[in-house]
Image: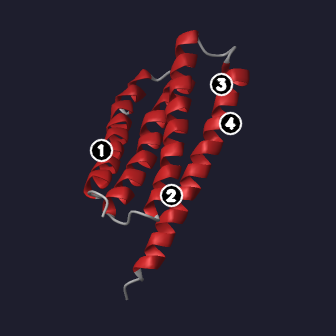
Amino acid sequence: MRLPTIFLEFLMLRSFLMLAAFFGFTGVALGAFAAHGLKERLSAEYLAVFHTGVLYQLIHALALLGVAILATHIPGRLITWAGFSFAVGILLFSGSLYALTLTGFSKLGIITPFGGLAFLFGWSMLGLAAWRLGSPP
């Protein structure tokens, strides 16, 4: 049995909104943790790396919020791929930077570019979705 399209769109909207809220919340919490709990424990270089993870997480949490809103107006897989890519990008990019700075295990930096590629793919899917909208009637 196939689920009705409207139900699937609702699930996608809800998922992207929940992810945006989760990543926004944890981004703010991790930023505060860095400012107050890690300042004395990490080198200035590692603290800057941690802050980069927070910055990209918060930017892409907002992007996920935008995707959730757009998904109600622009149906299709491109918007879904954009949201999915932003979420994966946060996990890989920001997550690897957090893990690298907290463990000191520099080989985790190998994961970071894959997160960056996921971000780029997400932005390109969003751009392609906009391109396909065409001109106004």
Front in this rendered view, residue 107 or 54: 54
Closer to the chain start, of discs 4 and 2, is 4
The residue that label 2 is drawn on is 69
Label disc, if present, on residue 29 of the rendered structure: 4
**Residue 135 or 37: which is nearer the viewer?**
135
Q: CA distance from mark 2 to mark 1?
A: 18 Å
Q: Are marks 4 and 1 in contact (CB under 8 Å)?
A: no
Q: Secondary structure at mark 4?
A: helix
**Mark closer to the chain start, 3 or 1:** 3
User: Real-space Cα distance between discs 2 and 3?
Assistant: 31 Å
Judge whether 97 appears above or below 48 on screen.
below
Q: Residue at x 32, y 62 (%)?
A: 77
Which is closer to the viewer, label 4 or label 1? Answer: 1
Location of residue 100 in the rendering, given as x and y in whole percent from the top left corner: 49, 26
**Which residue does the numbered mark 3 point to in the structure image?**
34
Query: Dot 1 corresponds to which residue?
Result: 124
What residue is at 42 percent from the left and 53 percent from the top?
83
Q: Secondary structure at mark 3?
A: helix
Q: In this view of the protein, which residue sits in the foreground, 68 or 91?
A: 68
Label 2: element kind? helix
Question: Which is in the foreground here, disc 4 or disc 2?
Answer: 2
Q: Is residue 51 left or right of residue 115?
A: right
Closer to the eye: label 2 or 3: 2
Label 4 with label 2: CB-CB less than 8 Å:
no
